[in-house]
Each structure stands twice: as C-alpha cells, then as structure tokens.
Amino acid sequence: MTKLTKPIAPLAAAAAVLVVTAFLAAQPLAAQTVDTVRSVRIAIVDPSNGDELAVLDPDQEITLIPGEEVLVRTFEPIATRRSDRRTLAATFGFGPAPTALEVVSNTPERGEALIRLNDATPGQRLHIGYKLADRLSLVNSSMQLGRILVRVASPGSTSVTGAQSSTGIGGIGLGQFSRPADALVTALYRGILLRDPDPGAAGARDELARNGYDAVRRVAGNIANSEESRYRLYDNGTSNVRRLEALYSNLLGWSRADVGRERWDGDLAELNRGNVAGVVDAIVRSQQFRSRFGI
C-alpha cells in the first residue's frame, strides 16, 4: 500500500500547480494587478461630446483659448485598451496665487474636474494641480501631487480642442475680429453709456475697419467724452459706482469681486474727478481688454 501512495504525491502537486495556473489565467487583468498605483496619466476630454482630446503625463502641456472648457481626468493605464484604465480619485486646484483658470465642477471620486480658462494674456503659462486621494497606495509618495500645464493660445495658434485663436484686427479688416465689430462697439456703448448703440454707431464700425486698434481707442475716447457720458447720465441719476461696474463687466469681463481694492478705489476716484475718458483709455490699453476682443 505504501508503494502505491508514494508516486501519487508528486502527481498531486503537479495537478495543483496546473489548477492554480488555470485559475489565474481565467482572472481579469485587474484582479492579477497589485493595488499599488505605479503611474499616472491625465486625460483631456471634450465635455460636450465625451471625445478624448489628449492623454498627458504629469508636467506636459495643452493649449486653450480663453472661454474654453475641458474635462480633466486622472487615471492609471492598466493595459493598452482604454477600457482597462483604472480611475484614480483626485482633487484639483491652482495654488494660492490668482489665476485665470476656474474649476466649474468636480467629482473627486472619479478623479474628474471641469476646468474653464477665463480671460488671460496670450502666451501666458498656467497650471492645473492635482492631488491623488490619500487612501491610494502609491509606488512612490511623490506621485500624490502633480500638475499639467496650460498655455494661453496666442493669435493664430490652435487649442487642444482644435479651435484656432483669432489673429486680431490690426489692419486686416472686420472679418478678423475674434468678436465681431458689432460686439466690440456694443461693449463700448454698454460699458461707457450703459445702453446699446444707436444707428449713429455705424460710423464707429467703419472707422474700426479702416484703422484697427488705434480706432478702438479713438472711438472709446469719443464716447467717453460725449455730452451724454459727461452730463446726461448723471442727470438721470447714474452713480459712478454703477458706471465702474459696467466698464469692468462689459470691457474686461470682470465682476467687482475680480478687481483688487486698490484698483477699484483708484478708478472710482478718477470717475469722481470727472476723468471718465482716462479710466476708459486705461482699460482699452490693457492687455486684458485686447485679449478679450482679439486686438
């Protein structure tokens, strides 16, 4: 009996190895993978249709045009197929300094955030920071914090979305406004006079077509120095606080909360002294204004 049982032991061991091997082969890839995160990628997604626009390593760069939004998503690639990605829970931010980037919405458990680029200087370099959830096991603790870079589109450059930034209007004509000429004239009237332009504004549009940016300053100055601006608005009870809010909103896209106290107080003091044209000209000469209207 002893002789019969001895050769069976190695056969049983070999059979056990085969069973374990077959079991592992039948398991999904994720079940065989150790739970430790070994690499991080960031997907850039079009929020309007879910199309993936780019996949980045940390510290790589995308280009955006002011006003654009993208969905940012952190994940670990498990295999070459997109369906095998592992979602990495994360939060997103930009650091303590003011930035033109904004988190519109976020879902930390899915490692997602909808990011918007507001008014910014062409060529400026910003960053989107992320922090992976504390509960994740990382192969290297330095992986928990990371970032990707955002380059503000310069005139003529292409965004990660495929859109092309305006080339501006300097002597090129009305068709090259990033915003139509009508929109620019309307913004000047609403910002300075707190109303829409009347039929007489057609002359201002023609001047913009002929003379480009220099005409923008002249048109803005003429509106600011008009009798309506200097007298009639005040006769109708309009305050300088309301006027300054209208200027910031229509010409720069800013709310009062976006303006530093020192600038607000300085511009309000100029309006109180009657220097409406000076405040308007400073705004029109600013990079924020030129970026907003592509000029």
Image: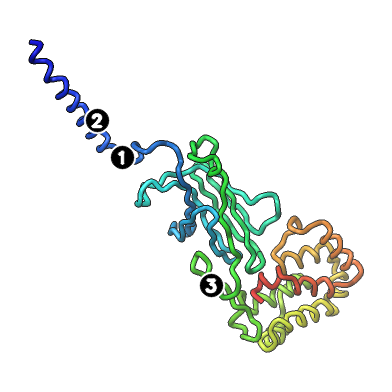
User: Tag 3, which secondary structure?
Assistant: loop
Give the residue type at disc 3.
Gln
Horizontal and vertical percent for residue 200?
73, 84
Q: Is residue 228 above or below residue 84?
A: below
Q: Which residue is mark 2?
A: 20
Q: Which mark is residue 28?
A: 1
User: Tag 2, which secondary structure?
Assistant: helix
Kindly report the distance in space between the C-alpha atoms of the residues bearing marks 3 and 2. 56 Å
**Image quadrant containing the C terminus:** bottom right
Horizontal and vertical percent for residue 60?
53, 58
Horizontal and vertical percent for residue 207?
70, 87
- Judged left or right of residue 186, residue 282 is right
Is any part of residue 120 visible from this angle?
yes
Q: Is residue 129 above or below residue 22?
A: below
Question: Which is nearer the eye, 210 or 93?
Answer: 93
Q: Which mark is residue 164?
A: 3
Kindly report the distance in space between the C-alpha atoms of the residues bearing marks 2 and 1. 14 Å
Q: Is residue 104 above or below residue 197?
A: above
User: Tag 1, which secondary structure?
Assistant: loop
